Image (cartoon, rainbow, N blue to C red):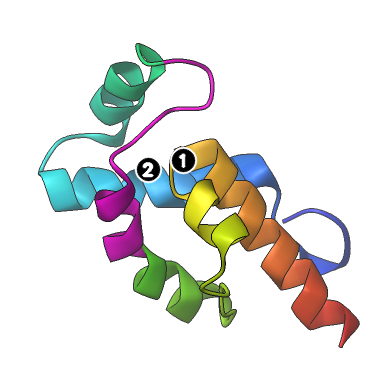
Amino acid sequence: MSNAGTPSTDEITSVVLDFLAEHEGISPDDLRSELEQGGRELPVDSLLVVEILTRIEERYQVAIPADREAAQATGSVRAFAAAVVDAIKERQQS
């Protein structure tokens, strides 16, 4: 983990990819390759990311608010990972 126990966006991205790959029954490397074809942000079906949300919240003991910004973050793995990092930082500051 990076500074002050906050995971990096890349670390969260890897965790999300692992969870998504498990859900899809494929390897994380195969999933990453598939998503990279859609662009650098690793676009993904928003509903699929929402299914992973609970697992991320449990793993990092963080709540992702159900607001417009969070909804937009579910459009790609990297945006979702960045939203998780932001939520972790907010929790640490409170």
Magenta highlight range: 39-52
- Secondary structure at badge 1 equals helix
- Which residue is tagged 2? 17
Q: Is residue 55 magenta?
A: no
Nearest the eye: 94 or 60:
94
Instruction: Classify 10 Å Cα crowding around label 2: few (below 14), some (14-19), many (20 and above).
Output: many
Q: Which residue is mark 1?
A: 77
* Disc 1 to disc 2: CB gap under 8 Å: yes
Q: Quadrant of residue 86?
A: bottom right
Name the N-terminal-most of marks 1 and 2: 2
**Residue 85 drawn at (x, y percent):** 69, 58
Q: CA distance from mark 1 to mark 2?
A: 8 Å
Q: Position of residue 15 (x, y in %)?
A: 45, 51
Give the answer, above or below, for where 75 lies relative to 52.
above
Judged from the image, the secondary structure of the residue bearing numbered disc 2 is: helix
Residue beneath the point at 56% across and 69% down:
67
Q: Is residue 54 visible?
A: yes
Whether residue 12 is visible, yes or no, is: no
Tell me which corner region of the image, top left, top right, bottom left or bottom right, holds residue 87. Answer: bottom right
Is 15 situated above or below 33?
below
Across and down, in percent, residue 31 comes to: 27, 29
Quadrant of the image containing the N terminus: bottom right
Indicate left or right for 9 with 30 as reference: right
Image quarter of residue 25 = top left
Amino acid type, label 2: Leu
* Front tag of 1 and 2: 1
- Expressed as whole percent of the image width and height from the top left, the position of residue 10 reads 62, 39
Question: Left of 10 or right of it: where is 76?
Answer: left
